[in-house]
Image: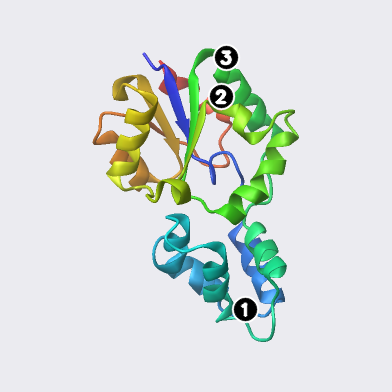
Amino acid sequence: MIKNIIFDLGGVLVRLDKQRCIAAFTQIGHEDFGRIINEYFQEGFFMDYEKGTINTDEFRAYVRKGIVGIATDAQIDEAMAAFLPEIPIEKLNALLDYKKSYRVFLLSNTNPVAIDTVKPMFEKGGFKMEEYFEKMYLSYEMKLAKPDIRIFEKVLEDSVLIPEETLFVDDSPVNLEAAQTLGIKTALILQENDLARDLEPFLC
């Protein structure tokens, strides 16, 4: 029986829009950001930022190398934020409903700019982001990122979760496979899915 649900953030709760992000960077003078996202989003300086091994100023400096002209910190942050346009209210309502019957957690590969972007989005559901979850596990704070098996081990240990009673919800098959090696139940959910309806078969 499932007693705990661990949700991913981007692509499961928050809608992702890569083309909107690329367009925003093009507007501030970065002509090659599409390649940067495709080649370095899961490695290199992007992943270093999400693992917390470089800070926001260092991340901006890497990005700025590809910008023709001058871009302010605020412009770079706003272009990054374009990747995360919204959280549908239906997903916020679904989280609140799940919280009535399950222990609900967040586990996300993310960074400070992204978290600052999405926090106000959660408030349209009537609560602060932190109030939707028993605990939030953020990669840049943990110095680890999915699909590293150690990040799942830390979550299980820290919140005293039994793997077989835990459902991990993510939009990445690689991340799901890593969780499965520990006995965690998994559900592949994409941003197009209805979070309330499409998760039910995995909760039996």
- Residue at (69% x, 77% y) in the render: 71
The residue identified by callout 2 is 197
The residue identified by callout 3 is 100
* Amino acid type shown at disc 1: His
Residue 201 on image: x %, y %: 44, 21
Residue 74 on image: x %, y %: 71, 66
- Residue at (72% x, 42% y) in the render: 120
**Location of the N terminus (image quadrant):** top left
Report, in whole angstroms, how far the alpha carbon at label 1 lies from the one at label 2: 40 Å
Q: Earlier in the sequence, mark 3 or mark 2?
A: 3
**Location of the C terminus (image quadrant):** top left
Report, in whole angstroms, how far the alpha carbon at label 3 lies from the one at label 2: 16 Å
- Residue at (61% x, 80% y) in the render: 31
Residue 16 appears in view: no
Report, in whole angstroms, how far the alpha carbon at label 1 lies from the one at label 3: 45 Å
Q: Earlier in the sequence, mark 1 or mark 2?
A: 1
The circle drawn on residue 30 is 1
Label 3–label 2 contact, CB within 8 A: no
Task: Return the residue nearer the eye: 179 or 200.
Answer: 179
Residue 174 appears in view: yes
Q: Is residue 166 left or right of residue 89?
A: left
* Amino acid type shown at disc 2: Arg
Residue 173 on image: x %, y %: 37, 44
* Amino acid type shown at disc 3: Lys
